Amino acid sequence: MTITPQMLGQVVISGILAGALYAMVALGLSLIFGVMRVINVAHGPLLMLGAFATYFLYHGLGLNPYLGLPLVMVVMFGVGALVQRTLVARVVDAPELQSLLLTFGIAIALVNLAQLAFTSDIRSVEYLTASWTVGGFAFSKSRVIAGVLAVAITAGAFLFLGRTRLGKAIRATSQSPDVALVCGIDVDRIRMITFGLACALAGAGGALIAVMVAIQPEMGQIWTFKSFLVIVLGGAGNYPGALLGGILLGLVEQLSSLLLTAQLSEAVSYVLLVLVLLVRPTGLLGGRAT
Amino acid sequence: MTPVLEVDGLVKSFGGVTAVDRVSLRLEAGAIYGLIGPNGSGKTTLFNCITGVERADAGRVLLDGRRVDGLPPWRIARLGVGRTFQTIRIFPELTAVENLLVVTEGDWEAACARARELLATVKLERLADEYAGNLSYGQQKLVEFARMLMRDPGLVLLDEPAAGVNRTLLNDLLDAVRALRDRGRTVLLVEHDMKVVMGLCETVFVLDHGEKIAEGPPGFIQGDERVIEAYFGR
């Protein structure tokens, strides 16, 4: 097989589009880790909830999945804040293994509850199935829109973190929670908001992929792994690092699927994970020490 | 008059060690108090109990006559207790001005104006938008001090303000502390440098093994037998 520049260009653009989505979802995971030192294994299952919400809004109310996106984010913010306040808050200051076990439990519970409530049937949102052809490149419409919206939402999240008082307080808390506390920052509230925000980002991911992939209760797990991979690549708790890691993962996946067989390309991301952990365990941009 | 801070019979133990043992203090408005004692005598633990970082096992802490023991640290901070640390604690990945802004509530414009003004009073206005982690040790100390002043606290707790600070900066800090007192604020400082304590404090409390063993003007404290014994042994 010869690889034309055309093919390479298409793969690079697809990689960046996919990477933007990875970056957005992984930013949520990174925020939770940065502010709470909690590895949220339930991040993927929360994304799955976002996809189901989009499905039911589409099939139940006939709501356009992209118009439903803000609604899904708001609902998922509430779900996240609730999960944090009722469950995660109890283990935030405990040894890391406890929070890992808790979020693992939440993940299992969410998947099983979804199976109970929605069954394991595979569902889909048939919307925007065609492609755009631009200068010889063909791009699936849903992937382009997902990539563009993910960029916009991620940019919005960074503006929020950088410019607003609440965003600055979130960054301050992730740099030094005990100092934030003594300075008068209500750290419990910051943690709740951060978890809500992270779930809104996961929910947005679920809404955006609802139109591309099969919706079923176990669709989320792979996203937990991918998000984890992204933040390890970029540096855990390093928020711009999630951006770099996401784009990198998107590119690596797309390029390896072009150059290698499909089975091998799946493995490449994980080889990358192992390599980064071996060579530069703090991530490419450096993580944040506790 | 109601004291600004009243600590009454405070006890705090860690395992079998009593770090603070039935300590009582009364701090009046507009005065500078010193808290001295050998290492491990319970000074920092006492600070932690006053600011809510540690919960006391027994005793009461009253701020302007209101009980605050049991409140979370952020509430106590909002009631007007400012604190600096022995080792500088700033938010390194926020700019100098952001370090001051994150601790505020309410009107944003007013907070921005106050933050710039406070940075100007410590001569850091030109570095306001620099990441705090890139500043020198002395500058970081000033950022921490300015951040502590953002809420205009009625009670200021300073943990070794003179540690690791050069002469010029120390004089600036001491002037700032005196200025606080002159505006009616109350200062309680932990300090090992006796010259600083003697030159600054009107009243000194001496802790040893968690107990308050003496209290009085610096000159009086220096001659106290129990104090000499605590520092130099019998």
Image (tube, rainbow, N blue to C red):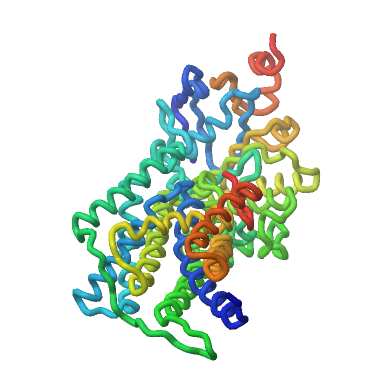
View extreme (right): residue: B167
Q: Nearer the viewer, residue A68 or B198?
A: A68
Quick check: A218 left or right of B16? left
Q: Looking at the image, which residue is at 50% across and 63% down?
A: A165
B177 up-or-down from B27: above or below: below
Splitting the image into 4 quarters, where does residue A6 fall?
bottom right
User: In the rendered image, which quarter contains the N terminus of chain A?
Assistant: bottom right
Q: Position of residue B90 (x, y in %)?
A: 62, 50
B116 up-or-down from B31: above or below: below
Q: Looking at the image, which residue is at 44% across and 40% down?
A: A93
A290 up-or-down from B27: above or below: below
Splitting the image into 4 quarters, where does residue B221 fall?
top right
Q: Position of residue A267 (x, y in %)?
A: 51, 56
View extreme (top): residue: B234
Q: Nearer the viewer, residue A103 or A222?
A: A222
A193 up-or-down from B24: above or below: below
Q: Position of residue B122 (x, y in %)?
A: 70, 56
Residue B61 appearing in the image: yes
Residue A162 appearing in the image: no
Quick check: B55 left or right of A278? left
Q: Position of residue A252 (x, y in %)?
A: 56, 65
Q: Nearer the viewer, residue A34 or B36?
A: A34
Q: Looking at the image, which residue is at 45% across and 26% down?
A: B10
User: In the rendered image, which quarter contains the C terminus of chain A?
Assistant: top right
Q: Nearer the viewer, residue B181 or A62?
A: A62
